[in-house]
Image (cartoon, coloured by chain):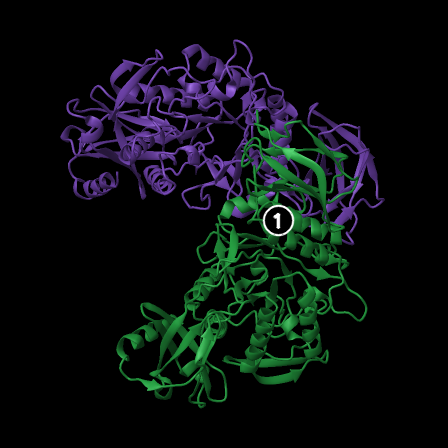
Chain colours: A purple, B green
Amino acid sequence: MWLKTLYFALLFLSLGQIAQRAYAQPQVEKWGRFELTLKGPESGNPFNDVLLAAEFSKGAEKVKVAGFYDGQGVYKVRFMPGSLGEWQYRTVSNTKSLNGKTGKFECIVPSADNHGPVQVADTYHFKYADGTRYYPFGTTAYAWTHQPEGLEELTLTTLKSAPFNKIRMCVFPKYYANVENEPRYYPFEKKDSTATPTGRVKFTWDFSRFNPAFFEHLEKRIDDLNKLGIEADVIIFHPYDKGRWGFDSLGKENDLNYIHYLTARLSSFRNVWWSMANEFDYIKTKPREVWDVYSKAVVAADPYHHLNSIHNGSVYYDNWKPEFSHVSIQNGSAVDGFGKAVLLKDVFFKPMLYDEVCYEGDLPQRWGHLSGEEMTEAFWQGTIAGTYVTHGETYKNPGDTIFWAKGGRLVGKSPARIGFLRKIMENAPGPLELADPWKDNCTATANSSYYLIYLGKDMKPEWELSLPNKAGPAPGKKFRIELIDTWDMTITVLPEVFETQRADGYRIFDKNRKSIRLPMKPYLAIRLTEI
Amino acid sequence: MWLKTLYFALLFLSLGQIAQRAYAQPQVEKWGRFELTLKGPESGNPFNDVLLAAEFSKGAEKVKVAGFYDGQGVYKVRFMPGSLGEWQYRTVSNTKSLNGKTGKFECIVPSADNHGPVQVADTYHFKYADGTRYYPFGTTAYAWTHQPEGLEELTLTTLKSAPFNKIRMCVFPKYYANVENEPRYYPFEKKDSTATPTGRVKFTWDFSRFNPAFFEHLEKRIDDLNKLGIEADVIIFHPYDKGRWGFDSLGKENDLNYIHYLTARLSSFRNVWWSMANEFDYIKTKPREVWDVYSKAVVAADPYHHLNSIHNGSVYYDNWKPEFSHVSIQNGSAVDGFGKAVLLKDVFFKPMLYDEVCYEGDLPQRWGHLSGEEMTEAFWQGTIAGTYVTHGETYKNPGDTIFWAKGGRLVGKSPARIGFLRKIMENAPGPLELADPWKDNCTATANSSYYLIYLGKDMKPEWELSLPNKAGPAPGKKFRIELIDTWDMTITVLPEVFETQRADGYRIFDKNRKSIRLPMKPYLAIRLTEI
């Protein structure tokens, strides 16, 4: 891959003059996808033999992107324009029929639901490229794109009314308990197949030839998600293969070719996030050192710098490395009580996503049997600490699929509550942080006129109006008090008003030291908004 | 400093032949201190003008060490030999009378209480250089070496019978509430002094001239600690100056000269640890970038690679950087309950020291008013998570000093309990780790024949004999059960025997599913040792 990069760099320097016209869409909206289709050689191994790239330019703005072979003599170059106006392009290739193609298109104003790709904002949080806040409320369906058509469509129907705006999903098919079916498409060209004694078909592959239909299908599903406003957290490698297909054991050269091909196809999709791996440390065929190479390869190949992370099993990767835009942590214990989520958040100076915190469900395994209450609690614990939590569902009902594995229906109790929390967040003036981290584990603030206090499992008959002095409001401010029932999903405006007094210590109290009565229920929260 | 290093490198290459004999101790024990004293120029500024170093060699072993000016025309070179046998040395200097001095000494077997410097072992733990386990049980007395003679001696008397084997202490004097006195010695030569309107004397300094008496005194105290088996966690910079002396604002060149001088004097002390700073982020005169330069300078100047860390205020430094041997964290909330200390431990792949977790005492500030129970709880929480916790005491009694500030007497309730825990650790077969991290927050193990289960604040009438399957013992093993009262400091052997059965899930139970009765007291622990 590095040789290819060098080769392209030289091409760009030397082949500027040889220009032929080519045609594609005349208009593309900002952060939309421009696609140039070219005809080229079918003989030999075009995946290996043909190098294709293009430079897109608009005045001083220049973006170099890799093209790819899409089978049957068709080559494509995709581009996501990030600014309005006329863009020009010129291809470079080691193949005459693909080299020096030029053209232009107009980048027009994006449509209303197109906010651009998600980016890091304010160190620990996110915004879309157009500045709109994005609070990740993710779910998990690792193998949903490897299912029968009808099931995939059902998943999309489910997601349409679910509260999730991100989904963790694997490129490669998954072989694991509850996900044992063959996928409809395979990423590589089949060389041969033999029946094993157990009746299963064992394939051999040509890892030097990709299967364009596989990727086309994946792309369709990513576009389907985009229409629903859902970010695709695309998992590049995973350990759930166990010799079934061998996609976890391609070897370093094939791994890098795959990264090159995948990024060439997908980088122009605005809702793509890269997840280098799920449970990277459980992929025993890849030593720890190689993730440095692979993550650098992804970053180098993606001209748009989509979000990138690496997800752990029981051992963390070096999440502070600059290739990672945010931290994607598996650790349910970090969000199962007060004062824990913030401990890891403070280490990395990046957004913290708890991307696996066990799942709501009834599997015998402890990672798959959270109650709805526990899953909801994890979201609240993560949210008030200024971090983000990802959902998954593992109920095993007869005749049903398991959403976490194959997609399908959601039957759990947490999604509605997660949607309720998402609305609260989207109505907040900005992202949350603990006001007085390490000391007050339950009071989050967006700014000095907005506080969200989560009371957790413990029930208290009353709560004394109080805020930490640190990041607290000035004296003499008045706050509306709302009692939030995070389980019953109600918000009740209380008749009392909280009037702040000057603090004489670490806390700010009401000027009359008022308390409010609480119902004897768990999972309450209090929202204080300056009047 | 880098120029100096280069200069020495060239000297070593070119001046090999010019050799004169010099005399020092004929015998030094392994990890003891060899000291060569030479006479040289007094004129000019010997701290700046004279460069002195020496190479010590024994066969293929070669160690280059910096010398230093000790005032009154005296120059010294110190060396800590790490292997037995005859060592030879040769000085190099830009000053003729100091250059080419050669000699030899014999490194002899260390005395019984000399185990060498402490080093990292087993990723998260420590050993002395001779292989003896070292479990840090530290305390804090930031300014104890800047007090009147009698108080310093009292501190040593206190430490002699206290349970601590490490102490955090500042090189520079400290100016803070409860530590406002002038020190006996200053690290730099005084240029001038003027009385301020408040009656305090304001000094001006020649930062290019060190005060050898200051460092000689510091060294005596570090040696005093060594005699007591206490490691000196030497804090190189700290923010507690506020314009009083200006030692937090020397500027980069003077800071680096100070590092060079300090490491030249102290690197040969086997009980020295480097702490780049206390609350580095509160030293507003030093931007974050500079700590990279300073920590690299310390590592480069210390040929023995003493332990090195950097301690934070409210923002962590990049503890994963290779200059740091271990993580020195201020965060009391990480050890105030179950399942928290391990969260940070898993991030860095280094020993984790919670070097400030608030202090036992009665100051109005929340960082200075832990109860003895809370301080003891912090130690147990850290210990069972495979991390290490540091003590400090801030009781303010009339006529007494505050140990955390000036040293003196310890009056708190936690030291005895910390000593009790230290004995338990030193009787364990090895360092502890959580057996089933992120899932079972209270069961630590040293190996499959030793488990230590901490029950914390909550009181339970009984406890079912049980261990996690992960890192658990084989079936059919028998364990002695001891009930530990961590507060009353008693260990009771119970009549029951725990006979392990094959696990059918995540837990191993007794073959008869036995439970043990517990007294209704908090802060109990259970020790299971294979019979």
For residue B238, side relative to residue B496 (left or right): left
Q: Quadrant of the C terminus of chain B?
A: top right
User: Does the rendering let one see residue A177?
Assistant: yes
The residue closer to the viewer here, B325 or B117, is: B117
Count every numbered label the image shows and give the total.
Answer: 1
Which residue is most to the top? A399
Rendering quarter of residue A71? top left
Q: Quadrant of the N terminus of chain B?
A: bottom left
Residue located at (77% from left, 58% from top): B364
Residue located at (62% from left, 23% from top): A414
Alpha-carbon neighbours of circle 1 within 10 Å: few (<14), some, or many (≥20)?
A: many
Query: Dot 1: what SS?
Result: helix
Compared with A153, A447 (above or below) is below
Q: Amino acid at mark 1?
A: Thr
Residue A368 x %, y %: 56, 24
Compared with A369, A384 (above or below) is below
The residue closer to the viewer here, B114 or B8, is: B114
On the image, numbered disc 1 is attached to which residue? B383
Compared with B313, A500 (above or below) is above
Residue B483 x %, y %: 71, 43
Rendering quarter of residue A133? top right
Which residue is most to the right? A512
The answer for which chain carries disc 1 is B
The residue closer to the viewer here, B415 or A382, is: B415
User: Does the rendering let one see residue A383?
Assistant: no
Residue A67 x %, y %: 26, 31
Residue A269 x %, y %: 39, 29
The residue closer to the viewer here, A404 or A180, is: A180
